[in-house]
Image (cartoon, grey):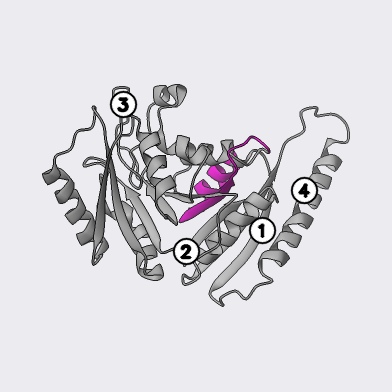
Amino acid sequence: MKKILFLTDFSDTSKKAIYFAQMLFDQTAAEFQIVNTYPALADLTYGTAAMLQAEDDAAKAQLDELLAEITKQPIPDFHAYHTTASLGEPVSTAERLLSQEPADFLVVGASGKHASQLLGSTATGVIRDCRTNVLIVPAFTQLRPVKEIVLAVTVTSINDMETLLPLKEILKAKGARLTLLTVTNKANKLTSEEIDQQRNRIANFLQAESVDPYIIHDDHIEHGINQYLDTHHVDLLVTIPHQKSLLDVILNTSVTRKLAFKPHVPILTLYEPDPQPTYTDYEEVSVIGLLPY
């Protein structure tokens, strides 16, 4: 059974993320944990305990309402739901919960705005800090069958093919078509032989009947990917955001996190530990799908 962790602020955007995940995993036995966080009070004065209890009670009441809303529609018998209200910030709370009980996926909504604590910055924060696969769902996502999936890669972007196992399971469950998108630039020049070897390696692991290759040449990786997304029908973009150095975070060089801040389509980032992140790693050059960022 898959464990799926949701972060919600009760907005329409976070609800859309839940509905999309329900649809994506509608053929998968899963336990859904829906989490809402509320901030600590800055002024720890007399009466703080009572105020925190009131915040907790209010969060739990809203979670109960949300749970009733998202389970109105028929749900599979192999789906289970429970809720958690927690004091703290969304990203740090997700990290803590994952350390206590690992989850297969973490799901958040993204609007591309700092409209609330959870939207936008939380989407990019969980990709950076949480050690699990992350599903980012834009507010405007249409709830339709997932049939077109794009995986972005470079020749060196996959250290362990087992990282692709969640994608393999989704492809099989949804009967979706996979496009292998590769973006090359001056710093990331790939030969046709290298691209063919990568495609064959991925297709063999995924046991996919066909993997359609697509190559874009663009000096700006993020621009190249978004250009593809704007001109093709894509239901899900898959990437591999490798953990980078502190300098990469400061300089904001992560392509995946830029894509996740204002996502054009739902994005699934597959977690793969980076054995030795360095200060010399160049920006994550690849396409959609498996981007080492």
Q: Is residue 35 visible?
A: no
Question: Where 208 falls versus 264 (above or below)?
Answer: below
Bounds of the magenta span?
Answer: 91-115
The residue positioned 42% from the left and 24% from the top of the image is 246
Where disc 1 sits, the SS reads strand
Instruction: Give the residue number, with chain letter if any, for mark 1.
Output: 83
Front residue of this view, candidates 220 and 171: 220
CA separation in Å, label 2 and label 3: 33 Å
CA separation in Å, label 1 and label 3: 39 Å
Residue type, mark 2 in image: Lys
Q: Earlier in the sequence, mark 4 or mark 3?
A: 4
CA separation in Å, label 2 and label 4: 27 Å
Q: Earlier in the sequence, mark 2 or mark 4?
A: 2
Callout 3: few (<14), some (14-19), or many (20+) C-alpha neighbours within 10 Å?
some
Q: Are marks 2 and 1 in contact (CB under 8 Å)?
A: no
Q: Which mark is residue 56?
A: 4
Instruction: Give the residue number, with chain letter if any, for mark 2.
Output: 2
Q: Is residue 214 left or right of residue 47?
A: left
Q: Earlier in the sequence, mark 4 or mark 1?
A: 4
Residue type, mark 4 in image: Asp
Instruction: Give the residue number, with chain letter if any, for mark 3.
Output: 278
CA separation in Å, label 4 and label 1: 12 Å
Front residue of this view, candidates 216 and 152: 216
Question: Where 12 falls versus 217 (above or below)?
Answer: below
Q: Position of residue 78 (x, y in %)?
A: 53, 75
Q: Position of residue 287 (x, y in %)?
A: 32, 42
